[in-house]
Amino acid sequence: MAKLYYYYGAMGSSKSANALMAEYNYAERGQKVLLGKTNIDTRDGERIIRSRIGLQKECVLLSDICAMADEEIRQYDAVIVDEIQFATKDQIDFLAHIVDDLNVPVLCYGLRADFQNNLFEGSERLIAICDEIKEIKTVCWCGKKAICNARYNKNGIVREGTQIMLGANDEYIALCRKHFLEGKLYGEKQK
């Protein structure tokens, strides 16, 4: 039975690398995978998934997947989507349709919450309806589990602004809840 999976983690937890490794594992076994990402993430090119450790692969956009006919999607053994936090509720519901009606597993990778610890639309919908939720863990500078995505600039942690602002290590850092609330981007271990 196919399932709708949600793999989430804070910034830098290797979500994209995990998505690319999952695609590779399917392909290595001769299975056909539909690899995609949401339309908003254009940092590495419109149709490229790239991890911070250098893995990358061409992909389709989630809007393209949602426009496909059921017969075309049935040709795949799995669907893998990166940056799923940027998906809409309707797109998540379409991914559930792929699982429930077409019996094709869907693996989604993304952030759970934004820089203010609010859920993204795609993440919220997945938490509500997915079959399995799995955390991809990473650590704060202090060594504790990081669960918060802090947006920062030269003045420190940014607490206000638009929910979606694409960035990488130069604008975001994963922190434990304590250091996120305290506004501590680093400590003695990093000095």
Image (spheres, helix red, strand yellow):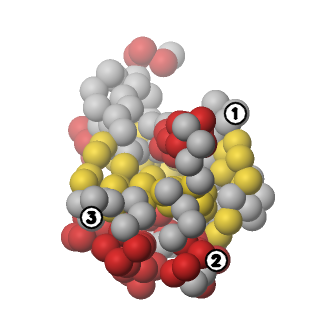
Q: Is residue 31 above or below residue 106?
A: above
At a point 48% along the width and 18% down the height, the residue shown is 190
Judged left or right of residue 137, residue 82 is right
At a point 30% along the width and 43% down the height, the residue shown is 135
- Can you give x and y, in whole percent of width and height, for residue 119 in the image? 32, 66
Q: Is residue 108 above or below residue 54?
A: below
Front label number (3 vs 1): 3
Q: CA distance from mark 3 to mark 1?
A: 29 Å
Q: Which residue is mark 1?
A: 54
Q: Residue type at mark 3: give it.
A: Cys
At a point 70% along the width and 33% down the height, the residue shown is 54
The answer to whether any part of residue 153 appears in the image is no
Q: Which residue is mark 2?
A: 64
**Does label 3 or label 2 sit earlier along the sequence?**
2
Q: Which residue is mark 3?
A: 130
CB of mark 2 within 8 Å of CB of mark 1?
no
Seen from the viewer's position, the closer of residues 1 and 44 is 1
Judged left or right of residue 167, residue 81 is left
